[in-house]
Amino acid sequence: MASLITQYLRTLIQAKKSTLCVSADVTSAAAMLSLADTVGPSIVVFKTHADMHTGWNADPEHGTGPQLAALARRHRFLIFEDRKFADIGFTVQQQYAAGDYRILDWAHIVNAHVLPGPDMIRALALEATKWKEQQPALKSDETMPFATPYQNIAEPPNDRALLLLAQMTSAGNLLDASYTETCTTIARQQRDFVMGFIALGPLNWEPEDDFVVMTPGCALPLEESLDGSEFAGSDPLGQQYITPQELMLRGSDIIIVGTGICNAKDPAAKAEQYRRVAWEAYENRIISIKL
């Protein structure tokens, strides 16, 4: 059975007619929060890089994490901290739950490499389970200090999930076919916690597989861009870009867009363009499957 986070994500996709994740490729916590508020109406997932957002406020009640969580409730999106855990079990548990960032408190989704082996995944799952057992019931919308246009959509659940990095879009990366297959094997051992993969296309190879795939390196063709802020093909550091239409055709569930939106003159309009283009491609894919 799909995790609560996966079920909620699929509800969001249909309710907001969006398959868009915006990556906060900005260098301050203030800019990150502003971006989340700006693009919130168009997205279903917002991806952070907490350790590169300067000025992070660690206050557990009023700091950066709680402020972002409030925006996620207001605009109805999931928060994905792109932490890429890759260490022994004890260490990743502390990185997940402790320190200034306290990722577990505000991020619905995190990700990890499987290089340390399956026990690292089990350690993260145990920490997430302990956190969930300590959470109070969700507040109703009536207690929120602001109105939201998404009253018909429930707030994000008090649950946590993990994505495994099965494939990457950077040139020369070492995640080969054997590594990808190992990722799928480990994911099946932790279905309650592992919701899917960062990958270039679907990895549901077994009949019972129901994993989500999120794909980075997404950019509109320059001729379709509102302002030409996208890279054509690749960037100077080896990132290889694929159009949202192509990713939807391949079967990705969520496209991840960073600089194409963060560097735009009007990030809200650019996010809405990506949402619309990807959603049209998604609907065309569903129609072709039914035919």
Image (cartoon, helix red, strand yellow):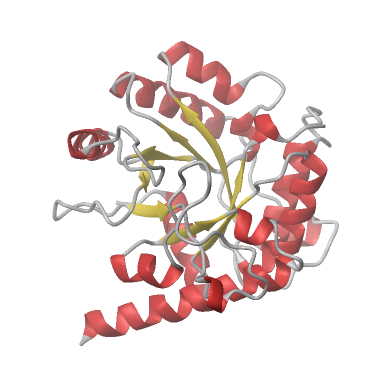
User: Which sits in the foreground, 100 or 154?
Assistant: 100
Residue 75 found in image quarter: bottom right
Q: Residue placed farthest to the left in the image?
A: 207
Residue 254 visible, this angle: yes
- x and y, in percent, of residue 259 in the image: 62, 54
In the image: residue 213, left or right of residue 149: left
Residue at the extreme front of the image, as rendered: 236
In the rendered view, tell whether residue 268 sits above or below residue 110: below
Residue 186 at x, y percent in the picture: 25, 33
Residue in the image at 22% along x and 52% along y = 209
Question: Which quarter of the rendering shows the C terminus?
Answer: bottom left
**Whole-percent x, y for residue 262 in the image:** 68, 56
Residue 155 seen: no
Q: Based on the displayed image, in which of its 4 quarters is residue 83 positioned?
A: top right
Q: Please name the residue shown 50% across and 40% down the image.
A: 160
Single out the residue that lies furthest toward the bottom. 291
Image position, residue 133 (x, y; %): 53, 31
Residue beneath the point at 69% across and 63% down? 39
Number of residue marks: 0
Q: Note whether 120 is above or below 46 in the view shown.
A: above
Q: Is residue 186 above or below residue 163?
A: above
22 lies left or right of 181: right
Query: What residue sits 71% from the left and 63% below the top?
Result: 264
Q: Is residue 210 above or below residue 136?
A: below
